[in-house]
Image (spheres, rainbow, N blue to C red):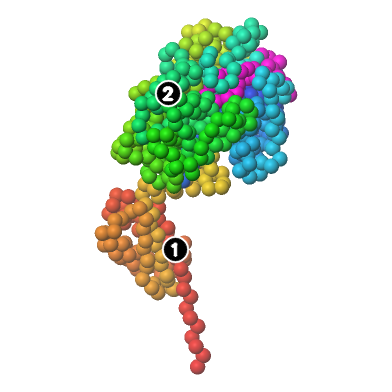
C-alpha cells in the first residue's frame, strides 16, 4: 500500500452469493478514499432462520465512513438491488440516484418505511450522466427481466470501470429498448480498465432467450387448459405480466392479480409509461365472480415463499382465491438456487390436490433475465476490458466466469467474495485486504445481527426445545412451594413422567446445595440450570434452552404479642 491515489472495489453483498447486492467503489489515498455505492439489496430468509423474512448486508464499513459516501446509485428495481434502501438508508443518509421506473418503485416502498421522509431521490434519464466527486457515471441501457436495467460506466482519473448490473442481450424485448450495443462497443474503444459483471448463468450454454418469443407459447398453453389457470411469476417482471395478459386475452380469459407486490409493480410501470393504462387487471375480490374457464390468476410466490399468494392458495388458506382439482398452475419462472426445497413442497401441495403443474421442464414458459455463456462472450468482445471481476454468483460461478473471461482474452481476472478490498489501479490488480462484513436481518421492526444472541438462542430452541423452571425459596434457600417445570417443543403429551422426574431433579439438587450457596440466587439458578439441562440431555439426548426463575420469599415478621 502506498500514499498514491488508488481505485478500489469492495463488495459487501452479492459476491460469493446470488442476491443481496452491495458494491462500493473508492478513489483516493488509502484510508482517505471517496466512495460511491452501487445497489443496496436484500435476500430472503428460509427455514434455517425462524421468524426472519429479510436479510441484508451489514453496512458497518461504509457507515463508519458515511461522510465520504457520495451517493447510492441503483442499477434497477429488483429487491436484491434496492430492497435494503428502506432499512439501511437512515444509517447512510446520502442521495440516491435512479432511473424513473426504479425511482417509482422505490418511492412506493419508502411510503411504508420509517425514518426515510427526507431521503433525496435524484432521477437520471436513460443513458444519463452524473458526476460524483472523482467519479463520472454514465448509464448504459441493457435488457433484463424488469424495465430500465442499467450497466454503469464509471470513469475515474486512473481508468474506467464497466459495472454491468443484471443484464442479458434481448434483441426483441416486450418492454423497453434493445441493448445499446453501439455504446458498449464505443466504451470498449475508449478503453475499459475493469468489467465487474453478472455470473448467474455462466454454466448455461447459448443465450438466455427473448421475452418476445414467449407470448405464442403461453397463449397455446393457456388455450389448452380447462378450469382456472394460475401463473406464478416474479412481480417485477413487467414484460412477463404484459405477455401473460396478452396470452390470457387471446384465450378469452380475464386476468386477476393475487399479491400486493404485483399491483405495486403495475402501478409503477403504468406511471412511467411501460404499461398501457388500458390494460385491465381485476382484483382478488373479483375472482369469485368469474366462471372458472374465464379466469387467469397471476400470483406471487413462484419461489415457494410461505406468505405469498400461491402458497396460501395451495394451502387453501387464501380468503378470496381458490384452486381445485382440474385447475392448472404455470410456473413462469426459474428456480433461484437455495429455493429448491420450498418450491418442491409448494408443488407437492398443489399436485396433492389434483392441480396440474406446468414448469420450464414441461414446456416453454420462461426465459431467464441473466446472460448465458454466449452473451457473456459477446459482452467481452464488445467491452474488451483489461481486468474481469466476476460478481453476482456463488464461488463456483465466479471461478467459471473468470475462466470464461480468460478464454475471451481478458488479461487479468480477480475472484473476490464479500469483504475483499480489491485494488484495480494502479499496479497489478488483486485483493489487498479484508474488511468488516456480515449480515443483518429484519426481526419484527428492528435490525439485528444474524450471528447475535437472539437468533442463536432461537435456533437452539427450534432444534432442542425450551425448558423453564420456577422455584420459590425462602431466605435460607428452602422450598416454600412445589417447583414448576414447563417445556416447549421437547416432550409429548403422553410423557408426563419426564416432568415429574425433572421436578425430582430440582428438589434433589437444592437439597444437596450447602445452605450458604442456597442463600445466593445466582448460585441456585446456575446449579438448577445445569442439573435440569443434564437431565434432559441424559434422558432425551437433547440440549434444550434452559431458563430458571428463582423467586425469593422473605420470612414474615413475627406478630407482636
Q: Is residue 152 magenta-colored?
A: yes
Q: Secondary structure at mark 2?
A: helix
Q: How many marks?
A: 2
Q: Position of residue 97 (x, y in %)?
A: 67, 28
Residue sitting at x 34%, y 23%: 362
Which residue position is annotated with label 1?
Answer: 549
Lower position in the chain sequence, tag 1 or tag 2: 2
The residue at the point 57 percent across, 36 percent down is 264
- Under tag 1, what secondary structure? strand
Where is mark 2, residue-wise? 219
- x and y percentages locating residue 470 in the rendered image: 41, 65
Q: Is residue 451 visible?
A: no
- For the magenta stretch, what is the residue range? 133-159
- Residue 84 relative to residue 521: left or right: right
Residues packed near mark 1 inside 10 Å, few (<14), some (14 to 19) or many (20 plus): some
The residue shown at (64%, 6%) is: 189
Compared with 353, 34 (above or below) is above
- Could you say which quadrant of the image residue 364 lies in? top left
The x, y position of residue 549, in whole percent, is 44, 63
Mark 2 neighbour density, 10 Å: few (under 14) some (14–19) many (20 or more): some
Amino acid at each position: 500500500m502506498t500514499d498514491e491515489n488508488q481505485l478500489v472495489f469492495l463488495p459487501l453483498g452479492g459476491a460469493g452469493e446470488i442476491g443481496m447486492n452491495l458494491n462500493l467503489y473508492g478513489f483516493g489515498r488509502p484510508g482517505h478514499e471517496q466512495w460511491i455505492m452501487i445497489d443496496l439489496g436484500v435476500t430472503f430468509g428460509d427455514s434455517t432462520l425462524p421468524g426472519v423474512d429479510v436479510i441484508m448486508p451489514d453496512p458497518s464499513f461504509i457507515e463508519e465512513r458515511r461522510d465520504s459516501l457520495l451517493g447510492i446509485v441503483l442499477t434497477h428495481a429488483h429487491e436484491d438491488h434496492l430492497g435494503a434502501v428502506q432499512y439501511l438508508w437512515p444509517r447512510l443518509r446520502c442521495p440516491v440516484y435512479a432511473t424513473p421506473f426504479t425511482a417509482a418503485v422505490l418511492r412506493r416502498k419508502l411510503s411504508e418505511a420509517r425514518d426515510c421522509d427526507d431521503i433525496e431521490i435524484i432521477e437520471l434519464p436513460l443513458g444519463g450522466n452524473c458526476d460524483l466527486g472523482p467519479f463520472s457515471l454514465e448509464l448504459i441501457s441493457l435488457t433484463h427481466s424488469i424495465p430500465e436495467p442499467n450497466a454503469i460506466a464509471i470513469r475515474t482519473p486512473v481508468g474506467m470501470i464497466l459495472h454491468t448490473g443484471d443484464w442479458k442481450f434481448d434483441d426483441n424485448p416486450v418492454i423497453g429498448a434493445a441493448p445499446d450495443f453501439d455504446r458498449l462497443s464505443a466504451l470498449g474503444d475508449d478503453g475499459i480498465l475493469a468489467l465487474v459483471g453478472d455470473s448467474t448463468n455462466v454454466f448455461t450454454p447459448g443465450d438466455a432467450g427473448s421475452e418476445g418469443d414467449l407470448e405464442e407459447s403461453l397463449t397455446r398453453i393457456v388455450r389448452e387448459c380447462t378450469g382456472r389457470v394460475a401463473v406464478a411469476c416474479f412481480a417485477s417482471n413487467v414484460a412477463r405480466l404484459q405477455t401473460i395478459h396478452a396470452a390470457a386475452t387471446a384465450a378469452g380469459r380475464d386476468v386477476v392479480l393475487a399479491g400486493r407486490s404485483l399491483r405495486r409493480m403495475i402501478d409503477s410501470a403504468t406511471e412511467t409509461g411501460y404499461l398501457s393504462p388500458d390494460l385491465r387487471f381485476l382484483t382478488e375480490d373479483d375472482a369469485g365472480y368469474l366462471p372458472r374457464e374465464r379466469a387467469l390468476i397471476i400470483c406471487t410466490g413462484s419461489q415457494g415463499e410461505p406468505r405469498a399468494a400461491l402458497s396460501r392458495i395451495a394451502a387453501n388458506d387464501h380468503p378470496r382465491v381458490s384452486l381445485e382439482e382440474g385447475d392448472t398452475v404455470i410456473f413462469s419462472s426459474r428456480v433461484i438456487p437455495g429455493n429448491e426445497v420450498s418450491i418442491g413442497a409448494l408443488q407437492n401441495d398443489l399436485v396433492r390436490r389434483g392441480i396440474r403443474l406446468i414448469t420450464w421442464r414441461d414446456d416453454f414458459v420462461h426465459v431467464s433475465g441473466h446472460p448465458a455463456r454466449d452473451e457473456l462472450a459477446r459482452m467481452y468482445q464488445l467491452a474488451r476490458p483489461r481486468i474481469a471481476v466476476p460478481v453476482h454468483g456463488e464461488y463456483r460461478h465466479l471461478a467459471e466466469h473468470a475462466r470464461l473471461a480468460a478464454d475471451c482474452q481478458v488479461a487479468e481476472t480477480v475472484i473476490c467474495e464479500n469483504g475483499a478490498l480489491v485494488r484495480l489501479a494502479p499496479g497489478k490488480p488483486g485483493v489487498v485486504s479484508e474488511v468488516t462484513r456480515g449480515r443483518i436481518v429484519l426481526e419484527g421492526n428492528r435490525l439485528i445481527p444474524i450471528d447475535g444472541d437472539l437468533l442463536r438462542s432461537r435456533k437452539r430452541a427450534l432444534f432442542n426445545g425450551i425448558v423453564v423452571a420456577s422455584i420459590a425459596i425462602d431466605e435460607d434457600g428452602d422450598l416454600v412451594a412445589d417447583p414448576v417445570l414447563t417445556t416447549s417443543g421437547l416432550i409429548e403429551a403422553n410423557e408426563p413422567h419426564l416432568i415429574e422426574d425433572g421436578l425430582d431433579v430440582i428438589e434433589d439438587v437444592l437439597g444437596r446445595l450447602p445452605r450458604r450457596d442456597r442463600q445466593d440466587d445466582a448460585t441456585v439458578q446456575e446449579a438448577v440450570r445445569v442439573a435440569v439441562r443434564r437431565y434432559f440431555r441424559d434422558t432425551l439426548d437433547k440440549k434444550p434452552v434452559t431458563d430458571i426463575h428463582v423467586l425469593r420469599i422473605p420470612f414474615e415478621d413475627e406478630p407482636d404479642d
